[in-house]
Image (spheres, rainbow, N blue to C red):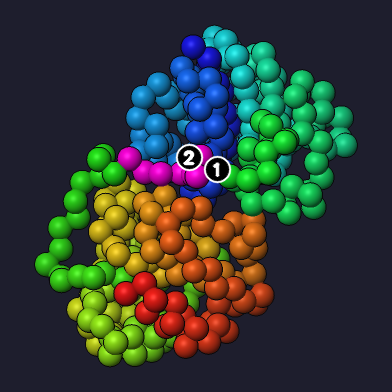
Amino acid sequence: MKKIVMVRRTGLGDFIAGMVPVCNLLKKKYGNVEFHLFMSKRNAELVKYFFPEDVYIYIWTSGNKYIQAINLGLKYRKINPDIGLSPIPDWPKLSNLFLFLIGAKERYARVNQKLLSRIFINHPLKMDDDMIHSYHVGLGSLKVYDSSINNIEQELLPRFNKSLIPDFNTELTGPFIMVEVSNNRITSQLSNEKMARILNDLINIKKFAVFITAKTEDKKKAENLKSMLNMESEIYINPDIHKFISFVNKADIVLAGDGGLGHIAGALNKKIVAVYGQTSIERWGILGGKVEHLYDPVDVNNIDDIIIKKALAGFL
């Protein structure tokens, strides 16, 4: 059995689009593998839906990241890993130090020209920021392990194990379109007024109900959108990632900005209209699902209502 250590401590999209394809590649190549994944708590809660067996999870907590890397690396040398890999880090010297300290025999990571980035890695991917950012994060992650890979094969795409997802109960009648009012990237968040105009116009084509997802602090914003809609709708405040996944899985179509919702919907093989403001679709586009990506270099609210409506109508 190959023991494989991987570290990726950032957001949901990083895990789903970046780490999962590499794990799938390594499982395909070696068959019998045991993953040891170092990551954030929020990402850790997703792991079981992709890899329910032979996975050990270690939480990379907040605080001084260099102290964390040293402490975790030395503490878990007992794993005695065969392979250590860091898919597309934005901080290569930190993750590369970690892979060295934990004692991985074969260490795969991106390196740059700085000495501290290079000295800890014996299988380096020599690539500067401009080059690595020209690839989709999933493809870039695969290149860390094998630089000859030039595309993401279908079998490597992130896919939730839907048998582990409980049904979401609702009294509304589908089909269901899911929208969000919470997005950390302001330029990728449609305004309530714009979403209401589009949805209220779209209901004249075919009946549907709307799911509105929001963070706790955006509850009033969600209620405001609900009050503006001319069709049945339901709000879900999403502090629990497992219930949130069930909620997304119930949707037929997802209208989402750049962020975790879109990547989750893609891994659930949903129909998605993804609106990206400033964020590169080439680098952060959704893997999986049936996706219509729409882009504006400044703000998604500059995208014409008709274009978004047409994309949604094509999925109804």
Mark 1 falls on what kind of element? loop
Nearer to the camera, 236 or 65 = 236
Q: Residue at x 46, y 17 (%)?
A: 32
Residue type marked 1: Glu
Relative to 38, is 126 on the left or the right?
A: right
Residue 230 screen position, x and y as percent = 24, 87
Residue assigned mark 1: 153
Q: Does the residue at mark 1 contact the one at mark 2 (Cβ under 8 Å)? A: yes
Q: Residue at x 32, y 51 (%)?
A: 245
Task: State left or right for residue 106 relative to residue 275.
Answer: right
Residue occupied by mark 2:
155
Amino acid type, label 2:
Glu
Is residue 256 among the parts visible in the rendering? no
Q: Quarter of the image containing the C terminus?
A: bottom left
Give the prevailing secondary structure in the magenta stretch: loop
As drawn, 210 above or below 167: below
Q: Is residue 172 above or below residue 114?
A: below
Q: Is residue 160 magenta?
A: yes
Decide whether residue 93 is among the magenta residues.
Answer: no
Q: Is residue 117 left or right of residue 188?
A: right
Residue 117 seen in render: yes
